[in-house]
Amino acid sequence: MVSQAKVCPPRRRAPTTAVTDVDHIENFVTQLRAARLAPAQATAASAFALINWLLDAACLAACLQAVGGGAGLVDLLLAFCAGMAASTLTLVPGGLGIIDSALIFGLLTAGVATSTVIAAVVLYRIISFGVIIGTGWIFWLLIRHRDR
């Protein structure tokens, strides 16, 4: 029995417009060279990033208080940093499951009750992930509707 090779349909791109990996890399390097931050801009960006993390940790603390739990500031920040560190290892969008697990285990080691920790982390993720995603979808729909 002889198998026939499938022939892929031709691409609709002209041969002269072929883009190689080298072209992508050169374009990326050109864009990196074009971005120049003044020291004041770099300081402001770093400060805003730090403020963002601190407010995110405050959101987690508020969620923990809202469900009737409490943890010390050091324990809370260690659990939060563990969650953020775990987010660098994830392949799942938004770190779903990975960040949650790290936060839960971090807060459990602080001595908070299991049911309280799970409720706090679920509430925190609904606020920090779900609300932001939902807001993004709403604005995307508004922009799409406006462009029609």
Image (cartoon, helix red, strand yellow):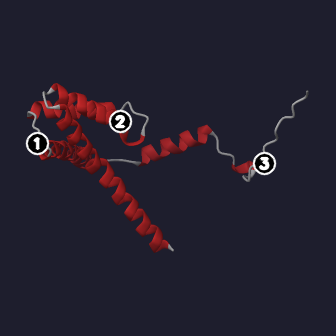
* Amino acid marked by disc 2: Gly
Reading the image, the residue beneath label 2 is: 97
For image coordinates 38% across by 63% down, the residue present is: 138
Q: Position of residue 15 (x, y in %)?
A: 75, 48
Q: CA distance from mark 2 to mark 3?
A: 42 Å
Residue placed most toward the observer, 124 or 114: 114
Q: Earlier in the sequence, mark 3 or mark 1?
A: 3
Of badges 2 and 3, nearer the viewer stands 2
Viewed as shown, does residue 108 lie left or right of 20? Answer: left
Q: Quadrant of residue 96?
A: top left
Height in image: 74 above or below 140?
above
Question: Few, some or many C-alpha atoms within 10 Å of disc 3 (few <14, some 14-19, many ≥20)?
Answer: few
Viewed as shown, does residue 148 lie left or right of 9? Answer: left
Q: Which mark is residue 10?
A: 3
Q: Earlier in the sequence, mark 2 or mark 1?
A: 1
Of badges 3 and 1, nearer the viewer stands 1
* Amino acid marked by disc 1: Gly
Of badges 2 and 1, nearer the viewer stands 1
Question: Few, some or many C-alpha atoms within 10 Å of disc 2 (few <14, some 14-19, many ≥20)?
Answer: few
Residue placed most toward the observer, 17 or 5: 5
Q: Which mark is residue 109?
A: none
For image coordinates 46% across by 72% down, the residue present is: 145
Viewed as shown, does residue 145 lie left or right of 96? Answer: right
Reading the image, the residue beneath label 1 is: 68
Q: CA distance from mark 3 to mark 1?
A: 63 Å
* SS at badge 3: loop
Q: Position of residue 131 (x, y in %)?
A: 30, 54
Is mark 2 in CB contact (under 8 Å) with mark 3? no
Q: Earlier in the sequence, mark 2 or mark 3?
A: 3
For image coordinates 20% across by 45% down, the residue present is: 47
Q: Position of residue 102 (x, y in %)?
A: 28, 30
